[in-house]
Image (tube, rainbow, N blue to C red):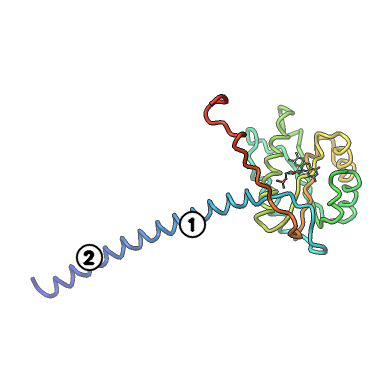
Amino acid sequence: MKKNNIYQIATFVLGVALIILAFTKTSSDKKAMETSKKEAVIENIHNRKSVRKYVADRPVSKDDLLTLVKAGMAAPSSKNGQPWAFVAISERRTLDRLADGLIYAKMLRAAPSAIVVCGRTDKDASGKIWPQDCSAAAQNVLLAAEAMGLGAVWTAAYPYEDRVAAVVEALELPPHIIPLCVIPVGYPNGTETPKDKWKEENLKWEKWGE
Ligand SMILES: Cc1cc2nc3c(=O)[nH]c(=O)nc-3n(C[C@H](O)[C@H](O)[C@H](O)COP(=O)(O)O)c2cc1C
């Protein structure tokens, strides 16, 4: 065999080996990325906690509020009806008015912002499903806040008539908009920690009796 041919074969073999190596590396990089994404998402779910104490004088940016609302709007909803509306608030006067009307949301006095998740009865043909849809949206907001290093807590409006009325009045909501919850948002002061809620007795496999 000529020397030239040996070189050609060697170059070809080397080329093929390099392609295989690059392919293997790309797929193992992809797998590693998927694993770390999975771990990050699960960890975020377990780290979420109700945060009622915030760093003083540290506002939440409008961009961050927008990111939270976008996470809310990414939630699943019955027949993809999206029967929701969000009110993002950073004005001190409005936050204080809400705190006045909601006995279990006094932390609004110290929170720099809040997001109110509302149901839209005009977008809910059944008139019954908006609380579930909006609850999914509210949970998305809470999870996004955790992932962004923010602290948030669900404080109830619906189904308590007096609390709904207080929010309707403070935000001048029209009749087809019903507030489900007010979510105060701020930077956590670091004192609150997640609770471990795993209880084996709350899981049944296949059927109740087994
Ligand atoms: C439907 C609902 C209503 C809630 N209402 C209030 C409320 O009015 N005020 C409050 O401080 N927390 C409220 N929470 C927060 C719960 O107290 C909190 O989620 C619960 O204690 C578990 O703690 P964790 O969120 O840190 O896991 C509410 C949560 C849900 C889901």
Q: Is residue 204 above or below residue 147?
A: above
Q: Is residue 63 left or right of residue 36?
A: right
Q: Is residue 20 above or below residue 72?
A: below
Instruction: Sort mark 2 into few (<14), some (14-19) or many (20+) by Cα contacts within 10 Å.
Output: few
**x and y, in percent, of residue 48 in the image:** 67, 50
Asked whether mark 2 lies closer than 8 Å to ligand 1, one says no
Q: Nearer the viewer, residue 201 or 191?
A: 201
In space, the residues marked 2 and 1 are separated at their CA atoms by 30 Å
* SS under mark 2: helix
- In the rendered image, the residue lying farthest to the left is 1
The image quadrant where one finds ligand 1 is top right
Q: Specify the quadrant of the image occupied by residue 17.
A: bottom left
- Name the mark nearer the viewer: 2 or 1: 1
Q: Is residue 17 left or right of residue 96?
A: left
> Which comes sooner in the sequence, label 2 or label 1?
2
Q: Nearer the viewer, residue 195 or 11?
A: 195
Q: Specify the quadrant of the image occupied by residue 202.
A: top right
At label 1, which amino acid type do we have? Answer: Met
Instruction: Sort mark 1 into few (<14), some (14-19) or many (20+) by Cα contacts within 10 Å.
Output: few
Residue 70 in view in this figure:
no
* SS under mark 1: helix
The residue shown at (76%, 60%) is 189
Asked whether mark 1 lies closer than 8 Å to ligand 1, one says no
**x and y, in percent, of residue 210 in the image:** 53, 26
**x and y, in percent, of residue 191 in the image:** 75, 57
**Residue picked out by circle 2:** 13
The residue shown at (40%, 59%) is 26
Q: Specify the quadrant of the image occupied by residue 165.
A: top right
- In the rendered image, the residue lying farthest to the top is 209
2 and 1 marks in contact (CB < 8 Å):
no
At label 2, which amino acid type do we have? Answer: Val
**Residue picked out by circle 1:** 33
